[in-house]
Image (cartoon, grey):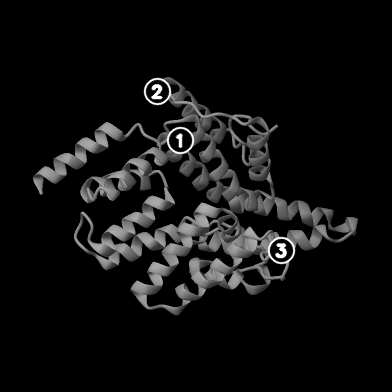
Amino acid sequence: MKNITIISLLIFLLLTHLSANKLEDNAFKEYKNKNYTIAFVLYTKAASKKSLKSLLMLGLFFEKGLGVKEDRAKAIKFYKLVLKNSSNIKEMLKDEKKSKIAITALKRLAKLTGSKKYEYLANKFTKIKESIQQEEDPLFGDGSTLVDDFFILCPFAALVAPEDREGIESFDCALFENFPKKMVLFMRLRRLRLEALSSDSKNLLPQIKKLNAKIAVTIQPMINYLQQEAVKCYQNSEESGDIRACDYDYLLKSDPLLFDNAAYKMEQAEKKHHIKSHKLDIFEKNDLINELISNISQHKYGKPWRNMVK
């Protein structure tokens, strides 16, 4: 056991500079060679960088007892973490890799827990994924909002009143878990704002301004939370591509709060300019973190921090 601990520590020290993808690649090689203890350590490190595949593999290791003591409870925990980090259903199902990982996690949960809800979601998401590959539009074309499915993945969201749930499946589940009362209030204010904006009456302009002010106060702790998560993400980044992924993750999660579409704009900018990733040295990394923290202190909500989206 002592030797395993020493090996684990050495691997962590030697490979902390690697990106999540490289850690995953190395972990998979060790897994294929049946070096499960080393693979487990590598997947654990990659999981700290929010790698969905690594979370899934850690669940498998605990489920099968590969390199660690078999522990069904921990396996279930990691499979649920996959879903927690995939709780924006629309985005997840449009991503080939993420959807495959999430569906696999659902299937494993269905087997371990015997719960029909996970089996139901695995089958439904598989059908939607197949429809997307056939260039159909099941997320919108059949009028389904996937709201009921979202509540299975994110039970705290069910606290939101039924009349305030439109588009709820686009929000990050962690917001409902960490700020349940704030999110319930925000969703109600959001509905009232949308209703006021849809009216042509100029008499509602004062009401809209008041709603905007209330929304700004309500979302501030959620935005602060997402930005602090971004700081942690920056700190775990080793390549410029990792930094851009942190930016995109923040924008994707903050867009529904800010009535913005910055994540989509960033995605299009990435495709247009074909920005290549490069290794970050310690000075560049610290500069980016300091710039991020500076922008957060100036309350630059909803804007990418390194001007990637004009």
Q: Which residue is mark 3?
A: 191
Could you tell me residue 188's position as x and y percent?
66, 64
Residue at the image point whose x is 45% and y is 30% from the top: 239
Residue at the image point whose x is 86% and y is 61% from the top: 199
Residue at the image point whose x is 29% and y is 62% from the top: 74
Residue at the image point whose x is 40% and y is 43% from the top: 49
Could you tell me residue 181's position as x and y percent?
54, 63
Q: Are marks 2 and 1 in contact (CB under 8 Å)?
A: no
Q: Amino acid at mark 3?
A: Arg
Near mark 3 (Cα within 10 A), the count class, few <14, some 14-19 or many ≥20, is some
- Closer to the eye: label 3 or 2: 2
Near mark 1 (Cα within 10 A), the count class, few <14, some 14-19 or many ≥20, is many
Q: Which residue is mark 1?
A: 234
Quarter assignment of residue 272: top right
Left or right relative to 189: residue 20: left
What is the CA distance from the residue labelled 2 to the residue labelled 1?
12 Å
Tell me, for residue 282, which label it has, or none: 2
Q: Amino acid at mark 1?
A: Tyr
Could you tell me residue 7's position as x and y percent?
17, 40
Give the mark nearest the N terminus, 3 or 1: 3
